[in-house]
Image (tube, helix red, strand yellow):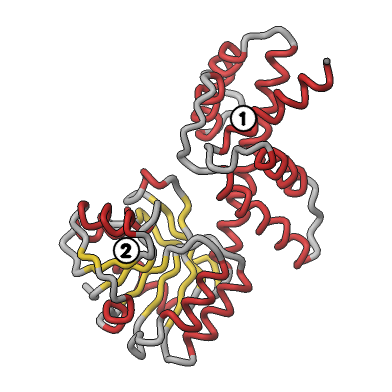
Amino acid sequence: MSKTAIIGLGTMGGRVAAKLAAAGRDVAGFDLSEEAMTAAAEAGVKTSADRDSIVADAELIVLSLPRPAHVVQAAESGLTTAKPGSLVVDLSTIDPGSAKKAAELLANQSVKYVDAPVLGRPEGCGNWTLAAGGTTTSVDIAAKELEGVVARKMARVGDVGAGSVVKILNNLMFGAINAVTAEALNTCRLAGVDPETFTNTVAESGAATVSNLFRELGPKLNNDDYEPAFSLALLAKDNKLAVDLEREVGAASFVAACVDQVNALTIDQGHASRDTGVVQELYRHVSRAATA
């Protein structure tokens, strides 16, 4: 298997690095955060403050970065030591335009690029699906390296940028389920029905509305548990990408625009770092104001 450099050892990248290290792969990691570097080292990952060195030594470079601008910046100036013929697999959630820009910049160095954002929760690393955009050859190479360790499946969904489209729209659906669950539970309470009874009854039914996310969110919201598994700030960033994508391609945007507003208003109340279910507090706040 290829020597691998992981750039970005945060929530997702740290797990990727740990899984590869546990599988006996030759992997080295870099992050600007000392805390992330320490956590990765404690998980058995070789870490280095010399990003250029580990990139130069790698055949496979995995990116897991917070925002589109970070990916483009990496492609412009952060991966200049990458070997011609090496492959960048980008797990970041970014817009398709940024993915295409990164691919174009790296092609100038004869470096291949696949955008392969994660479909799955952080704790599901090893069982993820990676929605991959790139040439068939590049995706096949990436799949041989990552399937069975980091992901259950790497699915080629189209050319560069297509993976990002799939991920953005997947997270739009997450945002919609998140918001409508909070709305339903708040309305249930105001209508005099116990929200926990509602959650349990629906979750145990054969109703088509039941999803894994509803089953997860319902109990958390009923217990006001906003310990972040996925922060509202990150969901808001992803949902804003969906609004921008819809605008760019000329798609009607009703649900995405509403979810974007719910997220933004909740963040304005100071809840950015809490779990996505904290949008429930916005519903409660507005409802109290309406009935005062």
Front tag of 1 and 2: 2
Q: Residue 135 appears at what percent x and percent y?
A: 48, 78
Q: Which residue is mark 2?
A: 146
Describe residue 90's horizontal placement relative to residue 176 as left or right.
left
Q: Residue 273 appears at what percent x and percent y?
A: 53, 42
Residue 79 is marked as none
Taking depth in this image into account, of 210 and 227 the one nearest to the observer is 227
Does label 1 or label 2 sit earlier along the sequence? 2
Query: The disc labelled 1 sits on which kind of residue?
Result: Ala
Q: Residue at x 58, y 11 (%)?
A: 197
Q: Are marks 1 and 2 in contact (CB under 8 Å)?
A: no
Query: The disc labelled 2 sits on which kind of residue?
Result: Leu
Query: Callout 2: 10 Å neighbours few (<14), some, many (20+)?
Result: many
Q: Residue 54 appears at what percent x and percent y?
A: 27, 77
How far apart are labels 1 and 2 at the CA level?
Answer: 34 Å
Q: Which residue is mark 1?
A: 208
Q: Residue 119 appears at what percent x and percent y?
A: 48, 52
Quadrant of the image for the N terminus?
bottom left
Describe residue 186's horizontal placement relative to residue 78 as left or right.
right
Q: How many marks?
A: 2
Question: Eyeballing the image, is 287 above or below 258?
Answer: above
Q: Residue at x 68, y 55 (%)?
A: 240
Taking depth in this image into account, of 110 and 71 the one nearest to the observer is 71
Which corner quadrant of the image does residue 250 belong to? bottom right
Question: Eyeballing the image, is 251 above or below 26?
Answer: above
Which SS class for mark 2? helix
Question: Eyeballing the image, is 240 above or below 210?
Answer: below
